Image (tube, rainbow, N blue to C red):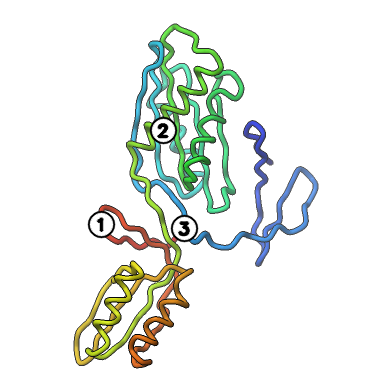
Amino acid sequence: MWERCYGLLFIPFISFGDADIALYSNVTITAVWRYEMLEKYKTVYEGGEGEIVEKKSRFIATVRPVSTEEEALAFIEEMKKKYWDARHNCYVYSVGKNREYTRCSDDGEPSGTAGRPMLDVILGEDIYNVAAVVTRYFGGVLLGTGGLVRAYSKSLQEGLAASTVIEKVYGISMEVITDYTGIGKIQYIAGEQKLPILDSEYTDRVILHLLVPSDQIASVEKAITEGTNGRAKMKKEKDLYYAVIDGEVKVFED
C-alpha cells in the first residue's frame, strides 16, 4: 500500500470530491485536503542522457518526462531491458504536482547509496513529473558508500543537464478588446509585465489574447482599465499552464 524511500513515507490517495482520503494499511486517515494548484513548477520537457566514469565503473543516467506512474514504471522496464547486462539499474520517479507517486530504488547497491541520492537531486532541483534510471556497469573497483552516493548524484545531474528542463507557469488566457487608441498602451503593459501575446486580430477593433500568470491577474486588469480609461474589455478564456521554450511560448493543459 505504501512505499518508504529511505526515510520518506509516501501514502497513496483516493480522490473523493474536494478532499483526498489517505489510506495507511487498514486505517483510514481523516481527509487530507488537496494543495492548491502550483503557480509554477519545473519539469522535464525533453529527456536526455548523461554519463560519467568513476574508477572504471560507467554510470549512465537516462531522464524522461512522465505524467503517470504507469509511464514511469514502463520507462524503468524499458531501461532494464536495454541495459540487461548491467550490474545495477537504479531508479527514481516523482509524479504529480503534490508528488503523489514518488519512489526510488537502489537495485542491489548498498542501502541508501543510489536511489535516495538520486531522489535528493530531483527534490533539490525541484523537478516534477520526471523519471530517471542510472545504469551502472561495474568496473571492478569498489567505490565505498560515499563514492557511490557521489557517483549516482553526479550522473543524474549530468542526465538532467542533457535534458530540457522548463518552468511551467499557471495562469489564464485573457481576451482583451480595445479600439486603436488603446492598443499602444496595452502592448506597453504587456511588455512591462512580461505577458506573452498569443494572438492578435485587427479589424474595426483590436483583439489581443494574453497569457497572464495567476498572481498577476488583478494587477493586469487594473493596469489595462486605468491605461485605457475603462474602454478596453477583458474576458478570461481558460485556465492553463504555459512555458517559454527556446524563445517560443507553448501552452499546456497541466
- Gap between marks 1 and 3 measured at Cα: 18 Å
Q: Which numbered disc flags the more N-terminal residue, 1 or 2?
A: 2
Whether tag 3 and tag 2 are in contact, CB under 8 A, the answer is: no
Q: Is residue 248 left or right of residue 111?
A: left
Residue drawn at 35 percent across, 41 percent down: 47
Residue drawn at 49 percent across, 39 percent down: 122
Crowd class of label 1 (few under 14; some 14 to 19; many from 20; radius 10 Å): few
Q: Which numbered disc flags the more N-terminal residue, 1 or 3?
A: 3
- Gap between marks 1 and 2 measured at Cα: 24 Å
Residue in front for this viewpoint, 10 or 116: 116
Q: Amino acid at mark 2?
A: Gln
Q: Secondary structure at mark 2?
A: helix
Residue 70 rendering spot, x and y as whole percentages: 50, 44
Q: Which residue is mark 3?
A: 40
- Gap between marks 3 and 2 measured at Cα: 22 Å
Residue in front for this viewpoint, 81 or 46: 46
Residue in front for this viewpoint, 183 or 164: 183
Crowd class of label 3 (few under 14; some 14 to 19; many from 20; radius 10 Å): some
Q: Amino acid at mark 3?
A: Lys
Residue 120 rendering spot, x and y as whole percentages: 54, 35
Q: Residue 203, relative to residue 8: is it above or below?
A: below
Q: Secondary structure at mark 1?
A: loop
Q: Which residue is mark 2?
A: 157
Q: Which numbered disc flags the more N-terminal residue, 3 or 2?
A: 3
Q: Which residue is mark 1?
A: 247
Residue 207 rendering spot, x and y as whole percentages: 27, 83
Q: Amino acid at mark 1?
A: Gly
Residue 3 rendering spot, x and y as whole percentages: 65, 37
Crowd class of label 2 (few under 14; some 14 to 19; many from 20; radius 10 Å): many
Q: Secondary structure at mark 3?
A: strand
Residue drawn at 20 percent across, 92 percent down: 204
